[in-house]
């Protein structure tokens, strides 16, 4: 199977001189998710931790309601890319078929055939958690994350998503060329490997509506991002009861929703 990196010959110009050597670059391939023999989606992804990607995507997109609905998973390398063949429970597959049937024949543009605002913005998942942590925990996590991203250090071309304890220790890390894929890989790893204590998710990207929705569906109480959130992400986080933190950088971070989960913070 293809690895997470590839080696290419590069020519580097620096201060008037040309250097020819080899460079490690991140691998990007088409990955198809096939449920009970029916192809559902193809995404561009880094071919690492694919079992985590399959489970995390299925849960965060609401295709599976629980990990036990995934009965079997096989990874097949094809000429054009990689196929993830998932066998899911009869109930989950029936719901997926109904979901696909509702998209057939629609002419609406933009979001996979969705034609109404209600379909584009479904009822947000509700997060119930008594998680509390300090600002210093987020600061510890951002420092650790920078040191733990081995694929980023090697290639400079990937996003990361980390599960951090309430004290700010990075317990799990997943990387991918796509920010949504990195998050799905992490969410899948959390379900597969388990998590011994309360914590939060830290991502090396902006916080979009989709990332908030995925986190809420998987019961994440706090999502922190190194960059900005979108207005819809803030709205979704507020409706879900999720704490959203943006611009997490050494010495600074901005809390947009549910600040009561951060100890010592005045609640406006």
Image (cartoon, rainbow, N blue to C red):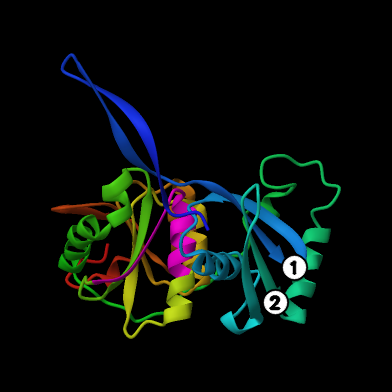
Q: Which residue is mark 1?
A: 96
The residue nearer to you, when weighing 146 against 16, is 16
Instruction: Point out the frontmost of discs 2 and 1.
Output: 2
Q: Residue at x 52, y 61 (%)?
A: 213
Disc 2 to disc 1, C-alpha distance: 10 Å
Dot 1 falls on a residue whose secondary structure is helix
Q: Can residue 239 be seen at all in this image of the molecule? A: no
- Taking 262 as reference, is 2 above or below it? above
Residue 88 marker: 2
Dot 2 falls on a residue whose secondary structure is strand
For the record, the magenta segment spans 170-187
**Residue 234, percent from left and from top:** 43, 54
The residue nearer to you, when weighing 67 against 211, is 67
Which quarter of the rendering shows the C terminus?
Answer: bottom left
The residue furthest top is: 16
Q: Circle 2: is it few (<14), some (14-19), or many (20+) Cα within 10 Å?
A: many
Between disc 2 and disc 1, whose residue precedes? 2
**Residue 85, percent from left and from top:** 67, 67
**Residue 100, percent from left and from top:** 78, 60
């Amino acid at each position: 199977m293809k690895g997470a990196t590839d080696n290419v010959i590069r020519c580097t110009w620096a201060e008037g001189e040309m250097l020819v050597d080899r460079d490690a670059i991140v691998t990007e391939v088409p990955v198809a998710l096939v449920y009970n023999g029916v192809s559902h989606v193809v995404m561009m992804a880094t071919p690492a931790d694919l079992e985590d990607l399959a489970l995390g995507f299925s849960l965060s997109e609401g295709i599976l309601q629980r990990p036990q609905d995934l009965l079997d998973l096989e990874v097949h390398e094809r000429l054009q890319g990689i196929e993830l063949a998932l066998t899911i429970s009869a109930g989950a597959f029936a719901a997926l078929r109904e979901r696909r049937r509702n998209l057939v024949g629609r002419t609406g543009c933009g979001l996979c055939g969705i034609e109404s605002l209600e379909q584009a913005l479904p009822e947000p998942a509700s997060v119930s958690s008594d998680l509390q942590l300090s600002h210093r925990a987020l600061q510890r996590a951002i420092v650790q994350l920078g040191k733990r991203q081995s694929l980023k250090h090697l290639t400079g071309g990937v996003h990361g998503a980390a599960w951090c304890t309430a004290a700010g220790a990075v317990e799990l890390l997943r990387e991918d060329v796509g920010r949504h894929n990195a998050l799905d890989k992490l969410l899948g790893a959390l379900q597969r490997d388990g998590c011994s204590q309360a914590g939060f998710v830290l991502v090396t990207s902006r916080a979009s509506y989709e990332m908030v929705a995925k986190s809420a569906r998987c019961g994440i109480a706090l999502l922190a991002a190194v960059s900005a959130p979108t207005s819809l992400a803030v709205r979704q986080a507020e409706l879900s009861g999720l704490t959203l933190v943006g611009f997490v950088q050494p010495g600074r971070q901005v809390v947009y929703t549910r600040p009561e989960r951060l100890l010592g913070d005045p609640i406006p």
